[in-house]
Amino acid sequence: MRTVIFRTIAPYLAALMVLFSIFVLLRGHNEPGGGFIGGLIAASAFAIYGIGCGVAAVRRAITFHPMSIAAAGLFLGGVSGLPSLFTGQPFMTSQWWYVHMLGVEVPLSTPLFFDIGVYLVVVGAITSIALGLEERESD
Amino acid sequence: MAASDYPVDLSQAMRMDPVPPGDWLIVAPLLITILGGALCLMTRKNTDAQPKVAIIFLTLLVLACAGLLARVLDKGVLTMVAGNWLPPFGIAFTVDAMGATLALVSSIVALAAAVFGINDIDKSGRRYGFYPFLLLLMTGVCGAFLTGDIFNLYVWFEVLLISSFGMLVLGNERAQLDGAVKYALLNIVATTLFLIATGLLYGILGTLNMADIARKAAAGGFEGPLMTVAVLYFLAFAMKAAAFPVNFWLPASYHTPRIVVAALFAGLLTKVGVYALLRIFGVLLPDARLMLSDLIAVVAIATMLTGVIGALAQTDLRRLLGFLVISGIGSMLAGLAIGTAPAMAGAIFYAVHSILVMTALYMAAGVMRALGGSYSMRELGGLYRASPVLAAVFLMLAFAVSGLPPFSGFWPKVLLVDAALQDGHGWIAGAILLTGLLTTIAVGRVWIYAFWRGGAEGTADGQLTATLVVPDEVRGPGVWLPIGLLLGLVVLIGLQPEFMMQVAQRGALTLVEPLGYLRSVFGDTVQ
C-alpha cells in the first residue's frame, strides 16, 4: 500500500477529511450529518493516514490515546445533559444561547455539545480499533 | 389484574411545570457512573488513582440510589422524561420501589467489588480498564433497573453486556477467552431475540414506553400476537437470567475471570434478567403471564433442582457457586410463576438476598483460594486452622444461601413458600424446600472439606497436613471490609427483615396493580 503517490497524498487527504468531518458535525443539527457520521469520517481519515504513513505517525498526530479521546467525548456528552438542572426542566432538555460574535449571531446549544461528545466517542473508539488492526498487520 | 382499558388524555400528558431538583435522583445513578467511568478511562494509565476515583464515584452512586429509594418510598413511582418530550414519545425513566431497591443493592455490591479489586486486580488489569468497565457496567445495570422504556432497556443491556465482555477477558488467559466466547455468543443470541421481540411489539402496539404498552395491551384486541412477543421475551430473558434449559453458558464461563469479576457477575447480571422478566410479565403483559404461568413454574422448578444438583456434583468451588446462582434464579422465577403480590414480593426479596450473598460467597472463595492455593475441593483443607474468621464467615454465608434463619435467605423463602401454598401450588413450595435442603448439603460439603478436613483429599481424620500460612494478599481491610459489609447486610436483613419486606411488598404491588406506574407517566388522568 505504501506507494509514493499514496504516501504523499495521505496527509493532505486526511487533513481534508478531518475538516470535512467537522463541517458535517456542525451542520448536523437540522440537516443530514451530525456527530456519529462526522466521527466516522474523521476516524477513516486517521485510518488512511495510518495506512499511508504508519501508526506511530497517527498516534503522534492525535497526541492523546484514542480511548482517552472517546472517554472525553463520553464525559462531554454526559455533562451536556446537566444545564437543564438549573432551569427546572428534566434531564437533557436542550438549552440555547445566542452569542453575537463579529456581527454574526451564533446559536450555541446543549445538543451541539452532546453531538461533539458523540463525535469524540466515535472518533476515539473507531480510531482505537483501526490503529490496533493496522499495528498488528505491520508487525 | 383484570383486563381493563386505561383511558389517557394525552393533551394533559405534557407537563410544563418545573421539575423539582430531587427528581434528578432518577437519572443521577446513570450520570454518576457515566462521568466516573469516563474519568477512569481518561486516567487509566495512573493505576494508583484508579481505585480511588472509582470508589469515590461508587460511594456517590450508593448515596444517590439510597436517596432515590427514600424518595420513591415517600412519593410513589417517579418518572422523568428526557428532554421534556411527551411521555409516549420521549424516553422515560420510571422508578418504582423494585427498581430503586435493586439499584441500591447493586451499587452496594459494586462498591464492595471496587474495594475488593484493590488486591485482586493487578496493575495490568487496571491498565486494561477494570475500573472503567466496573463503572460502565453499573451504568448498564442501574439503567436497566430505572428505565421506563423497553427499547432503552435493550440499550442498557447492551451497555452492561459490552462492559462485562471487557471484564471477562481481563488477564487474557486461554480459559478466559474460551469462557468469554461461550458467554458472548449465548448472550448475543439472547439480546437479538430481545430486540426482535421489541420490534414485533412496536409493530403491534406502536409504542415503546412501558406504561403505554401496559395500557394498550390491557385494552385488548392483540392477544395472539402479544403472546408470541411474550414467549420471545421469556426465552430471551430466561437466557439472560440463566434459567433451565438455556443456562449452560453460566457454569462454562463464571469460573474463568478474576474472582472479583466472577463475584460481581454472579451478583448482578442474572438478576437484571430476572428483573426484566418481573417487569415485563408483571406490568407490561400480565395476561400473557397468566397463560404462561404453568410453563414458568416448570422452568422455575427445573432451574432450582438442576442448579442445586449441578452444585452437588462439582468439585471446583467457583463452578459450584455458579450452579447455586442458577438454583437461586429458579426460586425467583417461582415467584413470577405464582404471580400473586406476596409471591412477587418474595421474588424481589430473593433477588436482593441473592445479589448480596452470591457476591460475598465468591469473594470468600477468593480468600479460600489465597489461603489454600486452589479452588478444587479435593486440594483444599485445614482452612479452619488457617483462618477461623473465614470459616465463620463462610458458614454464615452458607446458611444464608441455603435459606436458614437468622440470615437473609430465610425470609424470601418464607414468602415464596407461603404464597405458593396459599395459591394452591404445593409442588412449587415442595421444590423450594427441597432445593433448600440440597443447597445445605452442597455448601455443607464445601465447609466440611475445605475447613474441617486437615488437608487435601486423603488426609486421615485428626491429621493436619495443610500449611497454615496466611499470605499478605488476604490481610488488611481491602479484603475483609467488602466481605464484612456484605455479610453485615445479610445478617441485618435476616434479623430485621421488616424494612426489606415492606419495600419488596411496595415493589410487588406496582407489579400486580400498575395503576400507580401508569399515573406516574401519564399524570393523574389515568383512571
Image (spheres, rainbow, N blue to C red):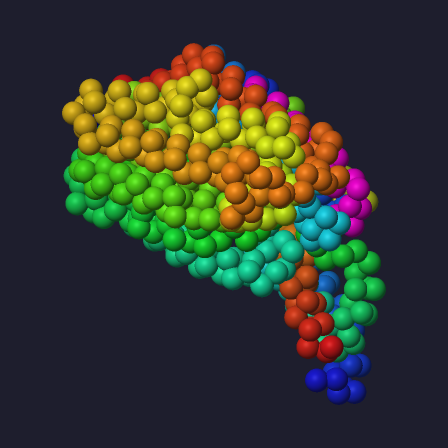
| The image quarter in which residue B9 lies | top left
| The image quarter in which residue B506 lies | top left
Q: Is residue B313 above or below residue B513?
A: below
Write the start and end of the magenta stretch as one range.
B44-67
Q: Is residue A131 above or below residue B109?
A: below
From the viewer's perspective, tell me whether residue B44 is left or right of residue B519: right
Q: Is residue B337 above or below residue B192?
A: above
Q: Is residue B60 magenta?
A: yes
Helix, strand or loop for the magenta stretch, by majority: helix
Q: What is the quadrant of the C terminus of chain B in the image?
A: top left
Q: Is residue B227 above or below residue A135?
A: above
From the viewer's perspective, tell me whether residue B349 is left or right of residue A30: left
Residue at 46% in and 21% down: B407
Q: Residue B433: image x %, image y %?
A: 29, 29
Q: What is the quadrant of the N terminus of chain B in the image?
A: top left
User: Do we see residue B325 in this rendering?
Assistant: yes
Residue at 47% in and 12% down: B496
